[in-house]
Image (cartoon, helix red, strand yellow):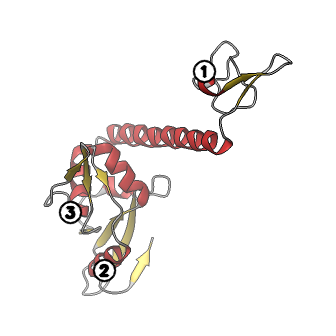
Amino acid sequence: MHCEWCPLCPTEKDDECGYFEQYGKEYKDGQYGCTMPRNKIEKIDDEYSSYLGDMGLDMGIAIDFQHHEWSMEETIDLIKHMIGLDYHKPYMRHDKLFYKPYRNYFSFNPKNDNKSFEYLSGESIGILRRYERYGDNCGFICYSLTEIGRRWLSRSIGVMIKEPEKRLNTLTLMKCLQTKVKHT
């Protein structure tokens, strides 16, 4: 059965909608329709679209890391260190692992090779946010994990990383920067 107007219905006429048995309806003129509430249809459609977007991001990052011969494991370990996951263990609830970060920053000396972090903080990826630290003639580069980065890391390591408190983000970032901030 094929509903003409439902975004969840397969595009091919021969395919059947997975929701037809529960919500399907045949009209007098021979067309098929759906009685599923519109808000439920939109929610399912949005979840599937974000799933496809996340899968594309994950595949793109993996392909780029292979192309540049960067180590995905080392980068993930540094990002786990960035949020403190290397010192504190995640807790289990309902057979799932959860973690609430207690910090969200990492500083690099510009002399060190951090090309993978530069790539992940680029405009097209946006997993990390990049800041430059001035003062004391140090010239360090600081990174923090964005919302997209938190979800990406959760999918990569299989631990649900909760959103840190806003106060915590500001305090840890200010501790990292200490002085004037220049966003790049």
Above-or-below relation of 87 to 59: below
Neighbourhood count class around disc 3 (C-alpha, 10 Å): few under 14, some 14–19, many 20 upward: some
Q: Residue at x 86, y 18 (%)?
A: 29
Above-or-below relation of 8 to 180: above
Q: Residue at x 22, y 44 (%)?
A: 73
Q: Nearer the viewer, residue 90 or 122?
A: 90
Q: How many marks?
A: 3
Q: Residue at x 47, y 39 (%)?
A: 56
Name the N-terminal-most of marks 1 and 3: 1
Q: Quadrant of residue 169?
A: bottom left
Q: Position of residue 143 (x, y in %)?
A: 33, 66
Q: Which mark is residue 21?
A: 1
Q: Quadrant of residue 147?
A: bottom left
Residue corresponding to mark 2? 171
Q: Nearer the viewer, residue 126 or 170?
A: 170
User: Which residue is situated farthest in the left direction here?
Assistant: 87
Label 1 and label 3: CA atoms lie apart by: 48 Å
Residue type at mark 1: give it.
Glu
| Number of the front mark, 2 or 1 | 1
Residue corresponding to mark 3? 84
Name the N-terminal-most of marks 2 and 1: 1
Neighbourhood count class around disc 1 (C-alpha, 10 Å): few under 14, some 14–19, many 20 upward: few
Q: Position of residue 31 (x, y in %)?
A: 80, 20
Q: Nearer the viewer, residue 75 or 163?
A: 163
Helix, strand or loop at disc 1? helix
Q: Residue at x 52, y 42 (%)?
A: 47
Label 2 and label 3: CA atoms lie apart by: 15 Å
Residue type at mark 3: give it.
Gly
**CB-based contact (under 8 Å), mark 1 and mark 3:** no
Above-or-below relation of 167 to 108: below
Name the N-terminal-most of marks 2 and 3: 3
Q: Quadrant of the C terminus?
A: bottom left
